[in-house]
Amino acid sequence: MKKREVLLRLLSGLVLLLLTSSVYANEEREMVPWFGKLESGGHLWIETPEGTELEWQGSLLDVYQPRTLIGFSRDEAGEFELVRRLPDGEEESWTIDVASRTYREQRVEGVPSATVSPSEEQLARIAREAELTLAARDSLTPGNTGVTMPFAWPLHGRITAVYGSRRWYNGEPGTPHWGIDIASPTGTPVRAPADGLITLSEDLFLSGETLFIDHGQRLTSALLHLSERHVEAGDWVRQGDVLGLVGATGRATGPHLDWRLDLAGQRIDAALWVPPMDDVCTIRGDGDEVVILLHGLGRTSLSMEDMALALRNEGFSTCNQGYPSRDETIQNLSSYVASAVQHAREEGKTTIHFVTHSMGGIILRYYLGHSSHAEEGRVVMLAPPNQGSEIVDALDDIPGFEEFMGPAVLQLSTDPDSVPNQLPPIELPVGVIAGDRSSDPWFDGIFEQESDGKVTVESTRMTTMTDHRVMPVGHTFMMHSRDVHAEVIHFLQNGAFK
């Protein structure tokens, strides 16, 4: 069926398309091979197969596989030219628009005077330690290690200072603050935000008990002002490992963690690698096993609350994670999963299950495929587009579709290069529930096979799934079905459907 004929059948489900400006009518849609946070202090990832050459503002960059990281400094903004030359000789270029940011001033009082106006002897120590930290940041661990995985908050607490703010210490002007400060009681465990190699473990004059983690591609996490360090230089750490304890050593007025990111000598904003702290889900219930729930595209965590209640009634704890599904790419959204998992680790949960709906399953697959997740658990996916979505194929070039649905939607096509079709298998036990009753009749003309109105039964399948169940439910409301609840609970408890 032609796309024009399909459009005529969408009716009320696609009224939004009629409201879109005609300026898009002749625009040819392009799936760009890059994503990131395009603002001052942010970063950009670009796919770089082996043999690729990259130019940024006319200068050649070091290239890594499978993709290369580019960072933007605190004051970097405007239009930047990016050129990619592929091994087959094809050359592509883009103008990257990096948005500017406004930074606040922060006045900090009560700082130890010696750290504000150090003596000559102390200045000499600071200079020696600067050389030490510079050498540690210049480390380049072979391979990507943790740099390409979704990052997680190293701990949860109250944010007291942010990246880029101009600092005044006891009335004296200082340099901008390069990290994000997280207040927490002394002795609170600090965890690795991603995998990496410890390249520095020292007691430094200004930053106190300090750790550096080389994540790969010269991306370094710095964890400052600790009260204790539990790792040494040369140690390999995995995301979630406890590295030390919160303290107030060095230039600090109270117990907190200062987490910083440095990319090849350029300070970038660590907060842009994780979701907003307040958006990380709350663990509810007293069960030893926790279930992290992930909703679908265009929905909110409220759509999974019936499921969460059913799980808590069966003795599970739940962490119903919301995320801005229409605002970010699948890669960026995966950090919500990483931080939810980190939060469960903080609560002592060693068995972490997942229940997903629709695109939530692809976000989970991205997290699991790019992380070192080690906890026990099982996964149930409701109507996941594991082989891509025929809806996206049919509508991807209709004016207003991407503008309304967001950047993640075009990543869900059935094209062999789409995100679902490029993800590695899941090693945890996985049960998939598909529906064969349409809840969206205006889409029925798109499908040639049985479907739930949004996803075909066949496209929900995954090569490494443990069990597959087809139920008489539709895509939009299947997570509210008591029969579906019963099957989900049975799989989480037994590793198979009824």
Image (cartoon, grey):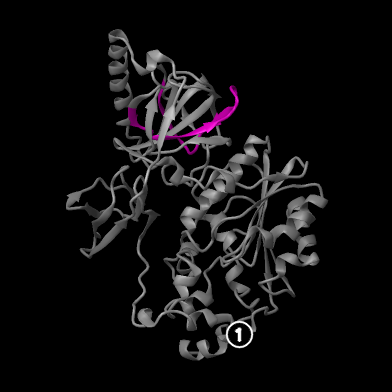
Count all numbered tags in the image, as a single digit: 1
Which residue is found at the position 61% from the left and 55% from the top?
322
Q: Is residue 310 magenta?
A: no
Instruction: From the top left corner, tell me how far across and down residue 224 is, in percent.
Output: 45, 26
Instruction: From the top left corner, tell me how far across and down residue 265 is, in percent.
Output: 29, 35
Asked if residue 490 lies left or right of residue 252, the reply is right
Q: Quadrant of the C terminus?
A: bottom right
Above or below, 12 relative to 480: below
In-front residue for pair 152/168: 168
Residue 229 visible: no
Which residue is found at the position 34% from the left and 15% from the top?
117
Q: Which residue is mark 1?
A: 442
Above or below, 245 relative to 445: above
Instruction: From the top left corner, tell me how far across and down residue 65 is, in percent.
Output: 34, 49
Which residue is found at the position 59% from the left and 60% from the top?
361
For the magenta stretch, what is the residue range? Answer: 174-201
Among the 4 quarters of the image, the one containing residue 85: bottom left
Asked if residue 277 lies left or right of residue 468, the reply is left
Among the 4 quarters of the image, the one containing residue 267: top left
Residue sticking out furthest to the front = 171
Instruction: From the top left corner, tell me how far across and down residue 348 is, in percent.
Output: 68, 34
Amino acid on which the number 1 mark rests in the picture: Trp
User: SS at mark 1?
Assistant: helix
Asked if residue 301 lies left or right of residue 243, the reply is right
In-front residue for pair 66/223: 223
